[in-house]
Image (tube, rainbow, N blue to C red):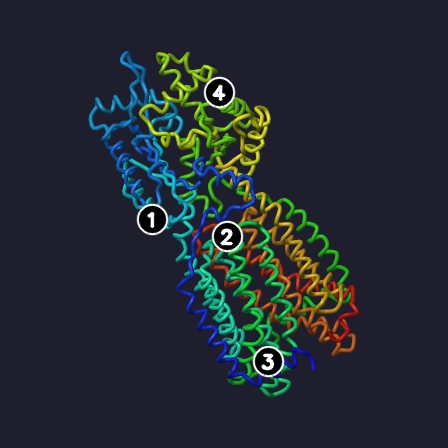
Amino acid sequence: MSLSARCARWVVAHPRLLGLLFALITAFFAAGLPRVKLETVFSDLLPQDDPFVQVYRDHPNFGNPLTVAVMVRRSDGGDLYNAETLAKVWQLTRDIDLVAGVDHDQILSITTERARTSEATPLGIDMRPLMGGHPPQNADELAAFRLRVDQAPKVRDFLISRDDKATLITAMLLERGTDYGTVFGAVQRLAEQARDAHHEVFVAGQPILIGWVYHYERQMILIFAVTIVALLIALGLYMRNWVGLLTPIVTSGVAAIWAFGLVGWLRISIEPLLMVVPLLLTARSFSHSVQFTERFYELYAELGDRRAAAQQTMTVMAGPSLLGILTDVLGIVVVCAAPIPAMVRHAIFCGMWAVWLIPTGIVLITVLLCTLPAPTHVERLIRRSPTSAQPLHERVLGGVAKLVHGRLAPLSTIVLLMLSAATIITAHRIRIGNPVEGSNLLWDDSAFNVAVRAINAQFPGVNTLELVLEAKRPNGDEWTAQQVDTVQTMLSLQRLLEADAFAPRATLSFADYLSESSRLFNGGHPAWSPLDPRTAAMGAATVGALMGASAKSYGHVVDDGLQNATVSLWYANNRQETVDAALASARKAIAAVGEDHDQFRIRLGTGTIALQEAVNRVIERYHIVVIAAVNVFVFLLASLAYRSFVAGLLLLVPVNLSNQALVAAMHLLGVGLDINAMIVAAIGVGVGIDYGIYLLSRICEELRAGRGDWAGAIGAALHTTGKAILFTATIMMLGILPWYLMSDLKFVADMGLLLMAIMGINMLLSLIVLPLLIWWVKPRFALRGA
């Protein structure tokens, strides 16, 4: 007696004991559900071993992407030099400063002390904030304020638009302990309060993007609920009995409780954006349950005994189910290869969910089948009656059977080869990275993307690249940032970059402020702006720049100890072609001035441009690794299970075609291959082999029963197991449709389309490609008992 037969006999003999055990384990995991957290930790979305990320961690103040940008713009044609607008900006700045999580030293607007102006007078240097202790309230104060703006360096570039209609407020967040949902809600409320008939307010920045994802969490849960209800209705209409309806519900529900409960006990946060993956795992659980139940119906009709049918079902289905679930698990676990903590956590969550499908999808379902009342009208359920009307799915499967064997097989093969070639060509056109201005997570007309475009149109933008000049001896007595070589290198980098064919919109460094200080302390004439290349002159310019101000006022370009500095570059957008060109330009400039100097080294880089590239490099490196690992695991497992290397190779063909078709679908849908899409795609490929395993196993059974009749075995497998495959794939595609129709998150809608593509592609490849391969190869292992 085989191991699966012995296990099945023991399970059927002890249903109450196993039912009690499952209930106790479920109660334990259910106790962990209140601890489950859906949250985003920004730094955990970054690859830990990337040099750009290491620069960001070493110098978090330079180009920190956790910055909220708020633009106030006159919408009635007037400019901002009026008491109403400046009072609004004044109040909005102070209200934002009070939001929990905002770094009070890193908030900047025309109303803060960090925005300063200096003027050379006969009595000395007059240094003061652009705005005093209150916003301008009369014509004289407004005129004086406007004059100070005209005299202040860089204000026209970074804080007030060239047409004088808009001004920008930026606030950097403290990462640890900051709740992005709270920040998002507070800033959005303040922005809404500031909007009126004369003023528009636009809010952007990475924290706001994360906040929008949080904002749509309830919507995602609602869509998930709608999907589950739709699946249950379809399942009930298909099964038409309580046994067929309850088994998928109970087994899938128990696996979900165990998965969420485990992460609750482990206190592992779940990335909200990737909540589409549990839907895919729910689909797999439904698929396993439907396959199991359909086979139970067949055996019950044959044996007439519920317990015997349940035992025989587990005996014949345990092997294919275990192999299919293990490929699911391995397809998920390989995602851990990428050094991104958020991906690792999600792989643990989803991987363990897939693991729980083994006890629930093999053992628990057997307990249910031998315990629940026997199904009625079994003959009608399995369509054994020769007089029954042939339903649509049987006609479809009959047509498929004619295409994959016999005289039509050569024509089907030629068509399939042509389609495969077109698919592979299309898949290779996929672009890694962000394909749009703003974020591809949201629709093009979303408030966030509209805000990004508006800010980019009025200011240098929200996308920076930082070239960090890092002191080799940061604890030394001298201020490295004011040394002649350091300052001259900053200026040289800026000149080279501004003269490049792909010049940034704006550049900024500590040297710019020193140039202004030099001008003021030499009488104020613009001719004195070029810095005197002597150490004493640099020191004097530094003292002049810091006079009446804290070093924190320059924290965006130099650190508190004046040891490390940065050259900031602004670019129009974060499309991948912009990222590539910006990094190429920066590397060329660094090579021209030299990367290594006596007192400092130049490190490229941080800022949104560099960090986006860091993530893209992980995708480029590990996407191939993940797919290769899935191939190796599938080959080894299938070869072991069927005791034939040919079996492993046969199953690899639809797996790889599925991957290519999925990537091609992403390209056609306009979905770039980013970190979130990579996770969904990798898991989709891992679970995509399940249909093939069930169908191959059934062909082997029918082949041995039919004594080598290949055409008959393929046809019988398609009409039995193929029917369950067609049903589960079809209802899952229909059930996922609400994710596209109802979601205000473009990423979720795109992933819904991708999940439908995964289901459809895997169904077609399993029902057509695999039988066609078996017809041509006629593998000998299929005739052996395995």
Helix, strand or loop at mark 3? helix
The residue pinned by badge 1 equals 185
Q: Residue at x 47, y 68 (%)?
A: 257
Q: Position of residue 534 (x, y in %)?
A: 47, 15
Q: Position of residue 176 (x, y in %)?
A: 40, 47
Q: Position of residue 161 (x, y in %)?
A: 37, 28
* First-in-chain label (3 vs 1): 1
Q: How many marks?
A: 4
* First-in-chain label (4 vs 1): 1
Contact check, label 2 and label 1, Cβ < 8 Å: no
Question: Looking at the figure, which quarter contains the N terminus?
Answer: bottom right
Q: Give the amino acid at mark 3.
A: Tyr
Which is in the foreground here, disc 4 or disc 1? 4
What's the distance in space between the residues labelled 4 and 1, CA to CA?
46 Å
Residue at the limit of the structure toward the front, as seen here: 477
Instruction: Classify 685 as above or below 512.
Output: below
The residue pinned by badge 4 equals 484
Instruction: Classify 336 as above or below 601.
Output: below
Which is in the foreground here, disc 2 or disc 1? 2
Which is in the foreground here, disc 2 or disc 3? 2
The residue pinned by badge 2 equals 342
* First-in-chain label (4 vs 3): 3
- Badge number at residue 297: 3
